[in-house]
Amino acid sequence: MSQPDWWREVLELSHSAYLRISPKQRICDAVGDTQALLGCEPDELIGLAPRALTDIRAQLGVAVSENLARRQVRPGETWGFEDGAGCYYGLSDGSAVIKLTASPHVDRGIVERLADQLPVMVAYVDREGYFRLNNQAYVDFIGISREALYGQPVSSVLDANSFEKVWPRFLQAFSGQEVNYEDQLSLQDGRTFYFQVKYVPDFMGQDVIGFYAIIQDVSEHRSMIQLLRDIHTSVNRTDISASEIIERLLNDTLSTLSLDIGLVSRIIDDQYIVKWAAPDVDITPGDTFALGNTYCRLMLDAQDVFHTIQAGRDERISGHPCYQQLGLESYIGIALRLNGKVWGTLNFSSPRPRHHPFTEMEIELIRLVADAVERVITHEAEIEQVRQELDVMADKASRDYLTGLPNRSSLDQHVAALISRDDLFSTAMIDIDHFKQVNDTYGHDVGDTALQWLSGRLSECLRGGDIAARTGGEEFVIVMQQTTLQAAEIAMERIRQHVKTGTITLPDGRELCITISSGLSLHAKGEPFSDTLKRADTALYAAKRAGRDRVCIDEAGGDR
Protein backbone atom coordinates (compact mmCIF):
# COMPACT_ATOMS: atom_id res chain seq x y z
CA MET A 1 0.00 0.00 0.00
CA SER A 2 1.48 3.38 -0.98
CA GLN A 3 1.95 6.15 1.55
CA PRO A 4 -0.82 8.39 0.12
CA ASP A 5 -3.33 5.53 0.43
CA TRP A 6 -2.61 4.66 4.03
CA TRP A 7 -2.31 8.36 4.91
CA ARG A 8 -5.74 9.04 3.44
CA GLU A 9 -7.24 6.12 5.39
CA VAL A 10 -5.69 7.34 8.65
CA LEU A 11 -7.12 10.82 8.13
CA GLU A 12 -10.60 9.46 7.46
CA LEU A 13 -10.52 7.06 10.43
CA SER A 14 -9.26 9.73 12.81
CA HIS A 15 -11.73 12.37 11.62
CA SER A 16 -8.75 14.70 11.13
CA ALA A 17 -8.12 17.43 8.61
CA TYR A 18 -5.10 19.58 7.79
CA LEU A 19 -5.47 23.10 6.42
CA ARG A 20 -2.39 24.78 4.95
CA ILE A 21 -2.59 28.58 5.07
CA SER A 22 -0.37 30.76 2.88
CA PRO A 23 1.49 33.85 4.19
CA LYS A 24 -1.23 35.88 2.44
CA GLN A 25 -3.87 34.23 4.66
CA ARG A 26 -5.49 31.99 2.07
CA ILE A 27 -6.11 28.25 2.29
CA CYS A 28 -3.72 26.83 -0.29
CA ASP A 29 -4.19 23.11 0.47
CA ALA A 30 -6.51 20.87 2.47
CA VAL A 31 -6.44 17.13 3.18
CA GLY A 32 -8.43 14.80 5.38
CA ASP A 33 -12.02 14.46 6.49
CA THR A 34 -13.01 18.07 5.75
CA GLN A 35 -16.53 16.99 4.81
CA ALA A 36 -17.27 15.71 8.31
CA LEU A 37 -15.41 18.52 10.08
CA LEU A 38 -16.20 21.54 7.93
CA GLY A 39 -19.06 20.45 5.69
CA CYS A 40 -17.20 20.69 2.37
CA GLU A 41 -14.65 18.84 0.28
CA PRO A 42 -10.94 19.81 0.30
CA ASP A 43 -11.09 21.32 -3.20
CA GLU A 44 -13.87 23.67 -2.12
CA LEU A 45 -11.64 25.15 0.57
CA ILE A 46 -8.77 26.15 -1.72
CA GLY A 47 -8.49 29.92 -2.06
CA LEU A 48 -10.77 30.75 0.85
CA ALA A 49 -9.71 33.11 3.62
CA PRO A 50 -9.44 31.02 6.83
CA ARG A 51 -11.73 33.41 8.66
CA ALA A 52 -14.51 32.53 6.22
CA LEU A 53 -14.86 29.16 7.99
CA THR A 54 -17.80 29.00 10.38
CA ASP A 55 -16.82 25.97 12.47
CA ILE A 56 -15.83 27.07 15.97
CA ARG A 57 -12.88 24.64 16.05
CA ALA A 58 -11.56 26.04 12.79
CA GLN A 59 -12.00 29.61 14.03
CA LEU A 60 -10.11 28.83 17.21
CA GLY A 61 -7.39 27.18 15.15
CA VAL A 62 -7.09 30.17 12.82
CA ALA A 63 -6.87 32.56 15.78
CA VAL A 64 -4.18 30.46 17.43
CA SER A 65 -2.11 30.09 14.26
CA GLU A 66 -2.31 33.85 13.59
CA ASN A 67 -1.26 34.54 17.16
CA LEU A 68 1.71 32.19 16.88
CA ALA A 69 2.68 33.50 13.44
CA ARG A 70 3.16 36.99 14.91
CA ARG A 71 6.24 35.75 16.71
CA GLN A 72 9.51 36.87 15.16
CA VAL A 73 11.15 33.94 13.35
CA ARG A 74 14.13 33.82 11.04
CA PRO A 75 13.55 33.09 7.33
CA GLY A 76 13.28 29.33 6.83
CA GLU A 77 12.67 28.63 10.53
CA THR A 78 9.87 26.25 11.49
CA TRP A 79 7.76 26.00 14.62
CA GLY A 80 5.10 23.80 16.14
CA PHE A 81 2.50 24.10 18.89
CA GLU A 82 0.13 21.43 20.17
CA ASP A 83 -2.65 21.55 22.74
CA GLY A 84 -5.96 19.89 23.42
CA ALA A 85 -7.67 22.08 20.83
CA GLY A 86 -5.46 21.16 17.93
CA CYS A 87 -2.00 21.26 16.42
CA TYR A 88 -0.39 24.22 14.65
CA TYR A 89 2.76 24.23 12.57
CA GLY A 90 4.81 26.96 10.90
CA LEU A 91 6.58 25.76 7.76
CA SER A 92 9.87 26.98 6.32
CA ASP A 93 8.15 28.80 3.42
CA GLY A 94 6.18 31.02 5.80
CA SER A 95 2.90 29.09 5.50
CA ALA A 96 1.08 27.61 8.52
CA VAL A 97 -0.77 24.32 8.96
CA ILE A 98 -3.74 23.77 11.27
CA LYS A 99 -4.70 20.25 12.29
CA LEU A 100 -8.32 19.74 13.31
CA THR A 101 -9.48 16.54 15.01
CA ALA A 102 -12.94 16.02 16.44
CA SER A 103 -16.19 14.20 15.96
CA PRO A 104 -18.75 15.81 13.65
CA HIS A 105 -20.85 16.96 16.60
CA VAL A 106 -19.09 19.12 19.14
CA ASP A 107 -20.14 19.16 22.74
CA ARG A 108 -19.97 22.64 24.28
CA GLY A 109 -18.27 21.30 27.37
CA ILE A 110 -15.45 20.02 25.20
CA VAL A 111 -15.12 23.40 23.50
CA GLU A 112 -14.96 25.10 26.87
CA ARG A 113 -12.17 22.83 28.04
CA LEU A 114 -10.27 23.25 24.82
CA ALA A 115 -10.73 27.03 24.77
CA ASP A 116 -9.15 27.25 28.19
CA GLN A 117 -5.87 26.02 26.71
CA LEU A 118 -5.70 28.62 23.93
CA PRO A 119 -3.39 31.66 23.96
CA VAL A 120 -6.13 33.85 22.42
CA MET A 121 -9.11 35.22 24.35
CA VAL A 122 -12.40 33.31 24.05
CA ALA A 123 -15.74 34.20 25.64
CA TYR A 124 -19.26 32.83 25.28
CA VAL A 125 -22.11 35.38 25.46
CA ASP A 126 -25.76 34.34 25.79
CA ARG A 127 -28.70 36.09 24.12
CA GLU A 128 -29.09 38.47 27.07
CA GLY A 129 -25.50 39.68 26.74
CA TYR A 130 -24.20 37.79 29.79
CA PHE A 131 -20.93 35.86 30.05
CA ARG A 132 -21.29 32.08 30.21
CA LEU A 133 -17.66 31.22 29.43
CA ASN A 134 -14.34 33.02 29.72
CA ASN A 135 -11.14 31.14 28.98
CA GLN A 136 -7.95 31.60 30.95
CA ALA A 137 -6.41 34.04 28.44
CA TYR A 138 -9.50 36.27 28.78
CA VAL A 139 -9.39 36.11 32.58
CA ASP A 140 -5.69 37.00 32.62
CA PHE A 141 -6.18 39.96 30.28
CA ILE A 142 -9.21 41.46 32.03
CA GLY A 143 -7.83 40.84 35.51
CA ILE A 144 -11.12 39.52 36.94
CA SER A 145 -11.61 35.95 38.12
CA ARG A 146 -13.65 33.45 36.12
CA GLU A 147 -16.13 33.13 38.98
CA ALA A 148 -16.65 36.89 39.17
CA LEU A 149 -17.19 37.16 35.41
CA TYR A 150 -19.67 34.29 35.07
CA GLY A 151 -23.23 35.52 34.68
CA GLN A 152 -22.17 39.17 34.50
CA PRO A 153 -23.18 41.41 31.58
CA VAL A 154 -20.53 42.34 29.03
CA SER A 155 -21.26 45.94 30.02
CA SER A 156 -19.56 45.20 33.36
CA VAL A 157 -16.25 44.89 31.49
CA LEU A 158 -16.59 47.55 28.77
CA ASP A 159 -17.22 51.23 29.40
CA ALA A 160 -20.57 52.69 28.31
CA ASN A 161 -19.39 54.10 24.96
CA SER A 162 -17.65 50.88 23.96
CA PHE A 163 -20.63 48.72 24.91
CA GLU A 164 -22.85 50.98 22.83
CA LYS A 165 -20.55 50.27 19.87
CA VAL A 166 -20.52 46.47 20.27
CA TRP A 167 -24.21 45.87 21.04
CA PRO A 168 -25.36 46.19 17.37
CA ARG A 169 -22.72 43.61 16.48
CA PHE A 170 -24.10 41.34 19.20
CA LEU A 171 -27.51 41.62 17.54
CA GLN A 172 -25.97 40.58 14.23
CA ALA A 173 -24.51 37.47 15.85
CA PHE A 174 -27.84 36.69 17.55
CA SER A 175 -29.50 36.86 14.12
CA GLY A 176 -27.19 34.08 12.92
CA GLN A 177 -24.59 36.21 11.14
CA GLU A 178 -20.87 35.69 11.59
CA VAL A 179 -19.32 39.01 12.63
CA ASN A 180 -15.76 40.18 12.04
CA TYR A 181 -14.43 43.58 13.06
CA GLU A 182 -11.48 45.50 14.44
CA ASP A 183 -12.13 48.43 16.75
CA GLN A 184 -10.81 50.49 19.63
CA LEU A 185 -12.60 49.66 22.86
CA SER A 186 -12.19 50.92 26.41
CA LEU A 187 -12.55 48.83 29.55
CA GLN A 188 -14.18 49.85 32.80
CA ASP A 189 -10.75 50.23 34.41
CA GLY A 190 -9.80 52.94 31.89
CA ARG A 191 -7.55 50.86 29.64
CA THR A 192 -8.05 51.23 25.89
CA PHE A 193 -7.10 48.64 23.28
CA TYR A 194 -7.56 47.79 19.64
CA PHE A 195 -9.20 44.38 19.35
CA GLN A 196 -9.58 42.05 16.39
CA VAL A 197 -12.84 40.23 17.10
CA LYS A 198 -14.86 37.41 15.55
CA TYR A 199 -18.34 36.35 16.72
CA VAL A 200 -19.40 32.80 15.79
CA PRO A 201 -23.13 32.13 16.40
CA ASP A 202 -24.01 29.01 18.43
CA PHE A 203 -27.05 27.27 16.98
CA MET A 204 -29.41 24.87 18.69
CA GLY A 205 -31.45 23.60 15.81
CA GLN A 206 -32.57 26.71 13.95
CA ASP A 207 -32.20 29.04 16.94
CA VAL A 208 -29.14 31.03 18.00
CA ILE A 209 -28.66 30.64 21.73
CA GLY A 210 -25.50 32.70 21.98
CA PHE A 211 -22.15 33.21 20.30
CA TYR A 212 -18.47 32.54 20.79
CA ALA A 213 -16.24 35.63 20.77
CA ILE A 214 -12.64 35.09 19.65
CA ILE A 215 -10.65 38.18 20.62
CA GLN A 216 -7.08 39.23 19.94
CA ASP A 217 -5.35 42.34 21.27
CA VAL A 218 -3.76 44.09 18.26
CA SER A 219 -3.32 47.42 20.04
CA GLU A 220 0.39 47.83 19.52
CA HIS A 221 0.36 47.20 15.79
CA ARG A 222 -2.95 48.99 15.20
CA SER A 223 -1.98 52.04 17.22
CA MET A 224 1.32 52.35 15.42
CA ILE A 225 -0.32 52.18 11.99
CA GLN A 226 -3.08 54.63 12.92
CA LEU A 227 -0.75 57.13 14.55
CA LEU A 228 1.65 57.00 11.59
CA ARG A 229 -1.29 57.74 9.30
CA ASP A 230 -2.40 60.60 11.52
CA ILE A 231 1.11 62.06 11.64
CA HIS A 232 1.47 61.91 7.87
CA THR A 233 -1.97 63.43 7.29
CA SER A 234 -1.61 66.18 9.88
CA VAL A 235 1.83 67.54 9.01
CA ASN A 236 0.94 67.77 5.32
CA ARG A 237 -2.29 69.69 5.79
CA THR A 238 -2.41 73.27 4.62
CA ASP A 239 -6.03 74.06 5.47
CA ILE A 240 -5.56 74.29 9.25
CA SER A 241 -3.19 76.23 11.48
CA ALA A 242 -0.04 74.95 13.11
CA SER A 243 -1.80 75.07 16.49
CA GLU A 244 -4.62 72.84 15.24
CA ILE A 245 -2.14 70.37 13.76
CA ILE A 246 -0.17 70.09 17.00
CA GLU A 247 -3.33 69.74 19.09
CA ARG A 248 -4.45 66.87 16.83
CA LEU A 249 -1.08 65.18 17.21
CA LEU A 250 -1.31 65.54 21.00
CA ASN A 251 -4.82 64.08 21.13
CA ASP A 252 -3.99 61.18 18.79
CA THR A 253 -0.91 60.29 20.83
CA LEU A 254 -2.83 60.49 24.11
CA SER A 255 -5.36 58.04 22.69
CA THR A 256 -2.60 55.67 21.58
CA LEU A 257 -0.81 55.74 24.94
CA SER A 258 -4.00 55.84 27.07
CA LEU A 259 -2.75 58.90 28.97
CA ASP A 260 -4.55 62.10 30.00
CA ILE A 261 -2.33 65.17 29.50
CA GLY A 262 -0.33 66.15 26.42
CA LEU A 263 1.90 69.23 26.40
CA VAL A 264 4.32 71.04 24.12
CA SER A 265 6.51 73.46 26.05
CA ARG A 266 9.01 76.18 25.19
CA ILE A 267 12.19 76.18 27.28
CA ILE A 268 13.87 79.56 27.81
CA ASP A 269 16.69 79.57 30.35
CA ASP A 270 15.16 77.94 33.45
CA GLN A 271 11.56 78.60 32.47
CA TYR A 272 9.09 75.99 31.24
CA ILE A 273 6.41 77.78 29.20
CA VAL A 274 3.34 75.85 27.99
CA LYS A 275 2.78 76.43 24.25
CA TRP A 276 0.08 73.81 23.52
CA ALA A 277 -2.00 71.63 25.84
CA ALA A 278 -4.51 68.84 25.21
CA PRO A 279 -7.14 68.00 26.08
CA ASP A 280 -9.02 70.45 28.32
CA VAL A 281 -6.93 70.42 31.50
CA ASP A 282 -6.12 72.92 34.22
CA ILE A 283 -2.84 73.70 32.41
CA THR A 284 -3.27 76.22 29.60
CA PRO A 285 -0.96 77.80 26.99
CA GLY A 286 1.09 80.57 28.55
CA ASP A 287 1.34 78.94 31.97
CA THR A 288 4.94 79.13 33.19
CA PHE A 289 6.77 76.89 35.64
CA ALA A 290 10.30 76.63 36.93
CA LEU A 291 11.97 74.03 34.70
CA GLY A 292 13.47 72.33 37.76
CA ASN A 293 9.97 71.66 39.10
CA THR A 294 8.98 69.60 36.04
CA TYR A 295 9.77 66.03 34.98
CA CYS A 296 11.11 67.58 31.77
CA ARG A 297 14.20 68.71 33.66
CA LEU A 298 14.97 65.04 34.35
CA MET A 299 14.32 64.22 30.70
CA LEU A 300 16.69 66.94 29.46
CA ASP A 301 19.37 65.70 31.86
CA ALA A 302 18.90 62.17 30.51
CA GLN A 303 19.22 63.50 26.92
CA ASP A 304 16.81 60.87 25.63
CA VAL A 305 13.20 59.77 25.92
CA PHE A 306 12.47 59.69 29.66
CA HIS A 307 9.56 57.70 31.03
CA THR A 308 8.03 56.21 34.15
CA ILE A 309 4.81 54.31 34.80
CA GLN A 310 4.63 54.65 38.59
CA ALA A 311 6.47 57.75 39.72
CA GLY A 312 5.65 57.21 43.38
CA ARG A 313 7.77 54.04 43.37
CA ASP A 314 10.45 55.37 41.00
CA GLU A 315 13.48 56.42 43.01
CA ARG A 316 14.42 58.89 40.23
CA ILE A 317 11.17 60.79 40.75
CA SER A 318 9.39 60.02 44.02
CA GLY A 319 10.78 63.07 45.83
CA HIS A 320 10.56 65.39 42.83
CA PRO A 321 8.60 68.67 43.23
CA CYS A 322 6.38 67.80 40.24
CA TYR A 323 5.28 64.56 41.88
CA GLN A 324 4.71 66.25 45.21
CA GLN A 325 2.60 69.04 43.65
CA LEU A 326 0.72 67.28 40.83
CA GLY A 327 0.99 63.58 41.67
CA LEU A 328 1.65 62.55 38.07
CA GLU A 329 2.30 58.81 38.11
CA SER A 330 2.85 58.19 34.38
CA TYR A 331 5.10 60.29 32.17
CA ILE A 332 6.95 60.05 28.87
CA GLY A 333 8.77 62.99 27.27
CA ILE A 334 11.37 63.98 24.71
CA ALA A 335 13.25 67.18 23.85
CA LEU A 336 12.22 69.23 20.82
CA ARG A 337 15.20 70.61 18.89
CA LEU A 338 15.48 73.32 16.28
CA ASN A 339 18.78 73.97 14.54
CA GLY A 340 20.43 71.45 16.81
CA LYS A 341 19.46 73.25 20.04
CA VAL A 342 16.77 72.46 22.59
CA TRP A 343 13.67 74.50 21.77
CA GLY A 344 11.26 72.87 24.19
CA THR A 345 9.72 69.53 25.13
CA LEU A 346 6.95 67.15 24.10
CA ASN A 347 5.49 65.17 26.99
CA PHE A 348 2.49 63.07 27.96
CA SER A 349 1.41 62.21 31.49
CA SER A 350 -1.38 60.98 33.74
CA PRO A 351 -2.14 60.90 37.46
CA ARG A 352 -2.90 57.19 36.94
CA PRO A 353 -0.12 54.57 36.87
CA ARG A 354 0.11 52.61 33.62
CA HIS A 355 -0.63 48.90 33.78
CA HIS A 356 2.26 48.06 31.47
CA PRO A 357 5.69 49.61 30.83
CA PHE A 358 6.17 51.72 27.72
CA THR A 359 7.20 49.44 24.87
CA GLU A 360 10.06 50.06 22.44
CA MET A 361 7.45 50.71 19.77
CA GLU A 362 5.73 53.36 21.90
CA ILE A 363 9.07 55.03 22.64
CA GLU A 364 9.88 55.11 18.93
CA LEU A 365 6.44 56.58 18.22
CA ILE A 366 7.19 59.41 20.66
CA ARG A 367 10.31 60.17 18.61
CA LEU A 368 8.24 60.24 15.41
CA VAL A 369 5.63 62.55 16.94
CA ALA A 370 8.44 64.84 18.15
CA ASP A 371 9.85 64.96 14.61
CA ALA A 372 6.40 65.94 13.32
CA VAL A 373 5.95 68.66 15.96
CA GLU A 374 9.42 70.03 15.18
CA ARG A 375 8.51 70.17 11.50
CA VAL A 376 5.27 72.03 12.22
CA ILE A 377 7.00 74.51 14.52
CA THR A 378 9.71 75.09 11.94
CA HIS A 379 7.10 76.07 9.36
CA GLU A 380 5.09 78.18 11.76
CA ALA A 381 4.88 81.91 11.17
CA GLU A 382 6.76 82.52 14.43
CA ILE A 383 9.84 80.70 13.18
CA GLU A 384 11.73 83.93 12.53
CA GLN A 385 11.40 84.85 16.17
CA VAL A 386 12.46 81.34 17.18
CA ARG A 387 15.57 81.58 15.02
CA GLN A 388 16.48 84.93 16.54
CA GLU A 389 16.18 83.41 20.02
CA LEU A 390 18.46 80.55 19.10
CA ASP A 391 21.10 82.40 17.12
CA VAL A 392 20.91 85.58 15.03
CA MET A 393 23.33 84.04 12.57
CA ALA A 394 21.95 80.47 12.69
CA ASP A 395 21.05 80.27 8.99
CA LYS A 396 24.43 81.47 7.78
CA ALA A 397 26.68 80.01 10.43
CA SER A 398 28.69 76.91 9.71
CA ARG A 399 29.70 74.64 12.54
CA ASP A 400 32.70 72.59 13.52
CA TYR A 401 32.08 68.97 12.48
CA LEU A 402 33.36 67.45 15.73
CA THR A 403 32.03 69.67 18.50
CA GLY A 404 29.03 71.29 16.86
CA LEU A 405 30.32 74.71 17.90
CA PRO A 406 30.57 77.59 15.40
CA ASN A 407 33.79 77.47 13.39
CA ARG A 408 36.20 80.31 12.60
CA SER A 409 34.12 81.56 9.67
CA SER A 410 31.01 81.80 11.82
CA LEU A 411 33.00 83.51 14.60
CA ASP A 412 34.28 86.16 12.17
CA GLN A 413 30.74 86.90 10.96
CA HIS A 414 29.48 87.24 14.52
CA VAL A 415 32.31 89.59 15.53
CA ALA A 416 31.90 91.63 12.34
CA ALA A 417 28.32 92.34 13.40
CA LEU A 418 29.47 93.44 16.87
CA ILE A 419 32.14 95.72 15.42
CA SER A 420 29.70 97.24 12.94
CA ARG A 421 27.46 98.21 15.87
CA ASP A 422 30.48 99.40 17.86
CA ASP A 423 29.52 96.98 20.66
CA LEU A 424 31.80 96.42 23.61
CA PHE A 425 33.13 92.85 23.83
CA SER A 426 35.92 90.81 25.37
CA THR A 427 37.65 87.85 23.75
CA ALA A 428 39.13 84.78 25.43
CA MET A 429 41.46 82.30 23.75
CA ILE A 430 41.40 78.87 25.39
CA ASP A 431 43.81 75.96 25.09
CA ILE A 432 43.59 72.50 26.71
CA ASP A 433 46.61 71.95 28.92
CA HIS A 434 48.93 69.11 27.80
CA PHE A 435 46.46 67.98 25.16
CA LYS A 436 49.21 66.19 23.22
CA GLN A 437 49.73 63.94 26.23
CA VAL A 438 46.00 63.05 26.19
CA ASN A 439 46.25 61.95 22.55
CA ASP A 440 49.54 60.12 23.09
CA THR A 441 48.33 58.33 26.23
CA TYR A 442 44.73 57.52 25.37
CA GLY A 443 44.53 57.85 21.58
CA HIS A 444 42.90 60.37 19.28
CA ASP A 445 39.40 58.96 19.87
CA VAL A 446 39.62 59.96 23.53
CA GLY A 447 41.12 63.27 22.43
CA ASP A 448 38.04 63.87 20.27
CA THR A 449 35.82 62.94 23.21
CA ALA A 450 37.65 65.47 25.37
CA LEU A 451 37.09 68.20 22.76
CA GLN A 452 33.39 67.38 22.57
CA TRP A 453 33.09 67.32 26.36
CA LEU A 454 34.87 70.66 26.69
CA SER A 455 32.60 72.27 24.09
CA GLY A 456 29.63 71.22 26.20
CA ARG A 457 31.14 72.61 29.42
CA LEU A 458 31.90 75.92 27.73
CA SER A 459 28.38 76.17 26.29
CA GLU A 460 26.85 75.56 29.73
CA CYS A 461 28.51 78.74 31.02
CA LEU A 462 27.55 81.09 28.19
CA ARG A 463 24.92 83.78 28.40
CA GLY A 464 22.57 84.70 25.60
CA GLY A 465 24.57 86.72 23.08
CA ASP A 466 27.92 85.11 23.98
CA ILE A 467 29.51 82.72 21.50
CA ALA A 468 32.08 79.92 21.80
CA ALA A 469 33.85 78.65 18.68
CA ARG A 470 36.43 76.03 17.90
CA THR A 471 39.17 77.62 15.80
CA GLY A 472 41.46 74.62 15.40
CA GLY A 473 43.00 71.67 17.25
CA GLU A 474 42.42 72.13 20.95
CA GLU A 475 41.95 75.91 20.64
CA PHE A 476 38.66 77.62 21.40
CA VAL A 477 37.58 81.27 21.36
CA ILE A 478 34.85 82.85 23.47
CA VAL A 479 33.45 86.29 22.65
CA MET A 480 31.53 87.92 25.48
CA GLN A 481 29.24 90.74 24.40
CA GLN A 482 28.88 93.90 26.50
CA THR A 483 31.55 92.62 28.90
CA THR A 484 34.47 94.57 30.34
CA LEU A 485 37.87 92.95 30.85
CA GLN A 486 37.31 92.68 34.58
CA ALA A 487 33.88 91.05 34.16
CA ALA A 488 35.34 88.72 31.51
CA GLU A 489 38.07 87.62 33.92
CA ILE A 490 35.45 86.67 36.51
CA ALA A 491 33.51 84.76 33.86
CA MET A 492 36.60 82.90 32.64
CA GLU A 493 37.59 81.96 36.19
CA ARG A 494 34.13 80.47 36.59
CA ILE A 495 34.53 78.56 33.30
CA ARG A 496 38.02 77.37 34.29
CA GLN A 497 36.69 75.99 37.58
CA HIS A 498 33.68 74.41 35.80
CA VAL A 499 36.06 72.54 33.49
CA LYS A 500 38.51 71.59 36.23
CA THR A 501 35.87 70.07 38.51
CA GLY A 502 34.32 67.96 35.75
CA THR A 503 35.35 64.47 34.69
CA ILE A 504 35.27 62.65 31.36
CA THR A 505 34.22 59.01 31.64
CA LEU A 506 36.17 56.82 29.22
CA PRO A 507 34.72 53.69 27.56
CA ASP A 508 36.67 51.44 29.94
CA GLY A 509 35.20 53.20 32.98
CA ARG A 510 38.26 55.27 33.85
CA GLU A 511 37.85 59.00 34.44
CA LEU A 512 39.89 61.72 32.77
CA CYS A 513 40.26 65.26 34.07
CA ILE A 514 41.53 68.18 32.03
CA THR A 515 42.35 71.80 32.72
CA ILE A 516 42.46 74.84 30.47
CA SER A 517 44.55 77.97 30.15
CA SER A 518 43.10 81.15 28.72
CA GLY A 519 44.11 84.61 27.68
CA LEU A 520 41.79 87.62 27.70
CA SER A 521 41.72 90.83 25.69
CA LEU A 522 39.26 93.71 25.35
CA HIS A 523 38.44 94.76 21.82
CA ALA A 524 39.81 98.27 21.26
CA LYS A 525 37.55 100.61 19.37
CA GLY A 526 38.42 100.66 15.68
CA GLU A 527 40.94 97.78 15.74
CA PRO A 528 40.60 94.69 13.52
CA PHE A 529 39.47 91.56 15.28
CA SER A 530 42.72 89.87 14.27
CA ASP A 531 44.61 92.31 16.51
CA THR A 532 42.26 91.53 19.42
CA LEU A 533 42.90 87.82 18.90
CA LYS A 534 46.69 88.34 18.81
CA ARG A 535 46.61 90.08 22.17
CA ALA A 536 44.41 87.31 23.64
CA ASP A 537 46.87 84.77 22.21
CA THR A 538 49.78 86.59 23.86
CA ALA A 539 47.95 86.46 27.20
CA LEU A 540 47.28 82.75 26.64
CA TYR A 541 50.99 82.01 26.25
CA ALA A 542 51.65 84.02 29.40
CA ALA A 543 49.20 81.73 31.22
CA LYS A 544 51.05 78.67 29.95
CA ARG A 545 54.44 80.04 30.96
CA ALA A 546 53.05 80.79 34.41
CA GLY A 547 52.16 77.12 34.97
CA ARG A 548 48.89 76.61 33.03
CA ASP A 549 45.38 76.15 34.51
CA ARG A 550 44.93 79.89 34.88
CA VAL A 551 43.55 83.04 33.25
CA CYS A 552 45.85 85.88 32.15
CA ILE A 553 44.79 89.33 30.95
CA ASP A 554 46.26 91.41 28.15
CA GLU A 555 46.67 94.93 29.49
CA ALA A 556 48.03 96.42 26.25
CA GLY A 557 44.73 96.97 24.53
CA GLY A 558 43.21 100.40 24.09
CA ASP A 559 40.58 101.78 26.44
CA ARG A 560 36.93 101.87 25.67
Image (cartoon, rainbow, N blue to C red):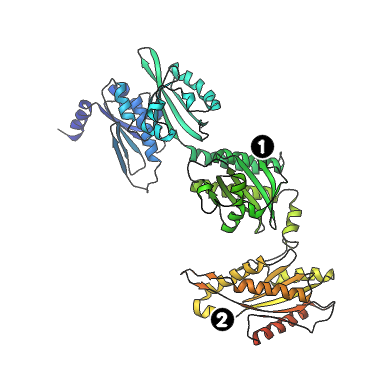
Give the CA distance from mark 1 to mark 2: 59 Å
Q: Which of marks 1 and 2 is nearer the N terminus?
A: 1
Q: Nearer the viewer, residue 23 or 114?
A: 114
Q: Please tell me whether residue 121 is drawn above or below residue 69 in the rendered image.
A: above
Q: Please tell me whether residue 555 is drawn above or below residue 351 in the rendered image.
A: below
Type of residue at label 1? Answer: Asp
Estimate the x, y position of residue 31 in percent, counting from the top left.
28, 30
Q: Please tell me whether residue 5 is drawn above or below residue 126 in the rendered image.
A: below
Q: Residue at 48% x, 25% y: name it.
A: 156
Q: In this view, which residue lies farthest toward the top?
A: 206
Residue named by callout 1? 280
Label pair 1/2, CB-CB below 8 angstroms: no
Q: Residue at 65% x, 44% y: name it.
A: 235
Residue named by callout 2? 436
Q: What element carries label 1?
A: loop
Mark 1: few/some/many CA within 10 Å (<14, 14-19, 20+):
few
Which quadrant of the view contains residue 145? top left
In which quadrant is the N terminus drawn? Answer: top left
Which quadrant of the view contains residue 41? top left
Which quadrant of the view contains residue 200? top left
